[in-house]
């Protein structure tokens, strides 16, 4: 129950017990991301992590904790025996625990063999969040993501093959407007259709003050897309993702139009909603109420 610095979690983990296992992000170079720029990556001492679990057990009604999110950045990078010890301690502390989740960076995931990932799943690591952001390799280089789309596909396949529920995120507007926007979405659709994640979430790019891209926006080197272009990117994604069924959301606070449902079943409904917003017949989230 002790935390170092600002803590981030995926929106769906709002009622999870947040256990800080690592501080910061192993990569920490993405130009659009300001989450961990003030933190130097390190793994917390195991003694402290295990103490925190005991503190949480004393603080909460233990039966009430059914979800735990391991933060900060990709806790999956920890040594196998450390992760197993954490999972064992969590399931022993909380009798109704049914889900333990983590961010899983591509390179960190690839430090684990398929057998190790399977072992983590068998010990109760149920879901991994992988930030794809874009499937366009040129853009991934530009934003210093540090991995290629092929590497992300390999990491995703390993997680899925281990039975770990894969949740990926994409950032609308990350390439800016015009042809770059089209290429970003076209390439992202290709990668996501190969990846076949169980969940795809879209965020919309908003400049974070701690990040290099914030300066680019301020100094005119990067142009934000308009609300209309953002809706058009969403429309292309909804039309182009051709596997399923999978869970699709664009209901993050940064998005102009909240969508939540299952594709392909909800495709026509989503397209109607997007077209209504594009035609000015339904309201979209105002700029001042958008947030990261
Ligand atoms: S986007 Fe993910 S990998 Fe990139 S710096 Fe932020 S936390 Fe690290």
Image: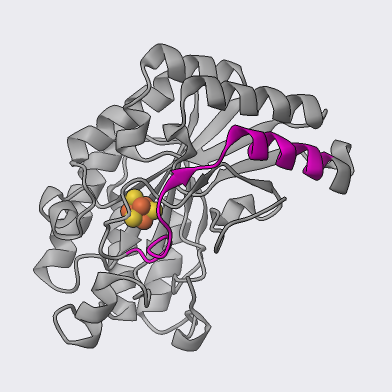
Query: Quarter-wise, where is residue 231 in the image?
Result: bottom left
Reply above or below: 69 against 47: below
- Whether residue 244 sits left or right of residue 134 in the image: it is right
- Whether residue 21 sits left or right of residue 178 in the image: it is right
- Whether residue 93 sits left or right of residue 171 in the image: it is right
Residue drawn at x 32%, y 30% is: 155
Image coordinates of residue 112 in percent, x first then y, are 38, 22
Residue drawn at x 20%, y 55% is: 144
Scheme of colours in the image: one colour
Query: Quarter-wise, where is residue 150 in the image?
Result: top left
Asked if residue 60 shows in the view, the reply is no
Residue drawn at x 42%, y 38% is: 104
Reply above or below: 81 against 101: above
Image coordinates of residue 223 in percent, x first then y, are 19, 80
The part of the chain drawn in magenta is 33-57
Image coordinates of residue 73 in percent, x first then y, are 45, 48
Of 263 and 94, the residue lying toward us: 94
Magenta stretch holds residue 290: no
Image coordinates of residue 220 in percent, x first then y, are 16, 86
Reply above or below: 112 against 130: above
Asked if residue 63 shows in the view, the reply is yes
Magenta stretch holds residue 49: yes
Of 275 and 177, the residue lying toward us: 177
- Whether residue 71 sits left or right of residue 98 in the image: it is left
User: How many labels, in total?
Assistant: 0
Residue drawn at x 14%, y 59% is: 142
């Amino acid at each position: 129950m002790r935390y170092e610095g600002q803590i981030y979690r995926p929106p769906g983990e709002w009622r999870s017990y947040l256990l800080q296992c690592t501080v910061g992000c192993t990569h920490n170079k993405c130009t659009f991301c300001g989450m961990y720029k003030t933190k130097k990556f390190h793994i917390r001492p195991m003694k402290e992590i295990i103490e925190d679990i005991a503190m949480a057990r004393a603080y909460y009604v233990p039966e009430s904790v059914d979800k735990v999110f391991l933060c900060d950045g990709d806790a999956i990078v920890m040594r196998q025996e450390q992760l197993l010890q954490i999972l064992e301690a969590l399931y022993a502390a909380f009798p109704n625990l049914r889900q333990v989740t983590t961010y899983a960076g591509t390179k960190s995931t690839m430090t684990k063999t398929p057998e190790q990932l399977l072992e983590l799943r068998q010990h109760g690591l149920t879901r991994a969040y992988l930030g794809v952001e874009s499937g366009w390799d040129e853009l991934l280089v530009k934003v210093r993501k540090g991995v290629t789309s092929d590497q992300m596909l390999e990491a995703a396949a390993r997680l899925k093959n281990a039975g770990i529920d894969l949740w990926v995120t994409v950032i609308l507007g990350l390439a800016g407007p015009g042809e770059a926007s089209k290429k970003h979405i076209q390439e992202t659709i290709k990668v996501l259709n190969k990846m076949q994640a169980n969940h795809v979430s879209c965020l919309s790019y908003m400049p974070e003050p701690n990040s290099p891209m914030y300066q680019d926006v301020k100094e005119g080197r990067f142009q934000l897309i308009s609300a209309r272009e953002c809706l058009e990117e969403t429309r292309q994604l909804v039309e182009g993702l051709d596997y399923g069924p999978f869970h699709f959301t664009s209901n993050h606070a940064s998005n102009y139009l909240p969508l939540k449902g299952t594709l392909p079943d909800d495709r026509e409904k989503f397209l109607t909603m997007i077209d209504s917003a594009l035609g000015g017949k339904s309201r979209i989230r105002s700029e001042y109420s958008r947030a990261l």
